[in-house]
Amino acid sequence: VQLQASGGGLMQAGGSLRLSCAASGRTFSSTVMGWFRQAPGKEREFVAASGGSTRYADSVKGRFTTSRDNARKTVYLQMSSLKPEDTAVYYCAARDLPGLQVTTGKYPYWGQGTLVTISS
């Protein structure tokens, strides 16, 4: 499977951005899709996952929403009320098995990442 993330950019604090991740090469509707992020000097961390239901990291709950268009094989991450601490490279990831996992090792497929920079 190939994943292509897009939509990152520079935004002021309080603003909104929407990231997209297009998947190819496999049945999408049954695939669990995850979003992770990695800030400079930090480990990659879980942000959100979708696959029948959704799951969010506490740090983004209420501000970020993940959704998916199975016909377009695309998953989205709508980010609102952005904070400088949201600055990171955002990655989409996929796994075949069920379960909204929060650890990077549970996702065998990864996109290339898209940079989100939030200025104060």
Image (cartoon, rainbow, N blue to C red):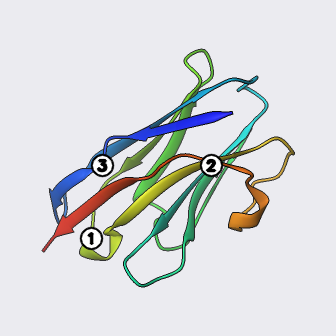
Q: Where in the figure is residue 109, as x and y percent of width and height?
A: 68, 47
In the picture, the disc for residue 52 is none
Of all residues, the one furthest to the right in this rendering is 97
Q: Where in the figure is residue 47, as x and y percent of width and height?
A: 54, 62
Of 10 and 41, nearer the camera is 41
Give the side of residue 85 with respect to residue 46, left or right.
left
In the picture, the disc for residue 8 is 3
Q: Quadrant of residue 88?
A: bottom left
Front label number (1 vs 2): 2
In the picture, the disc for residue 83 is 1
What amino acid is found at the position of numbered circle 2 in the picture?
Ala
Up/down of 67 relative to 39, above or below: above
Question: What residue is at 39 percent from the left and 62 percent from the top?
Answer: 89
Of 95 and 13, nearer the camera is 95
In the picture, the disc for residue 93 is 2
What amino acid is found at the position of numbered circle 1 in the picture?
Lys
Local crowd at mark 2 within 10 Å, few (<14), some, or many (≥20)?
many
Q: In the rendered structure, which disc, 1 or 2, sits on the residue that comes first in sequence? A: 1
Q: Where in the figure is residue 67, as x and y percent of width and height?
A: 53, 37
Q: Quadrant of residue 7?
A: top left
**How far is mark 3 from mark 1, CA to CA?**
14 Å
**How far is mark 3 from mark 2, CA to CA?**
16 Å
**How far is mark 1 from mark 2, CA to CA?**
23 Å
Question: What residue is at 61 percent from the left and 34 percent from the top?
Answer: 2
Up/down of 3 relative to 10, above or below: above
Up/down of 19 relative to 119, above or below: above
The quadrant of the picture occupied by the C terminus is bottom left
Q: In the rendered structure, which disc, 3 or 1, sits on the residue that comes first in sequence? A: 3
Q: In the rendered structure, which disc, 3 or 2, sits on the residue that comes first in sequence? A: 3
The answer to whether residue 81 is visible is no
What amino acid is found at the position of numbered circle 3 in the picture?
Gly
Q: Where in the figure is residue 21, as x and y percent of width and height?
A: 49, 37
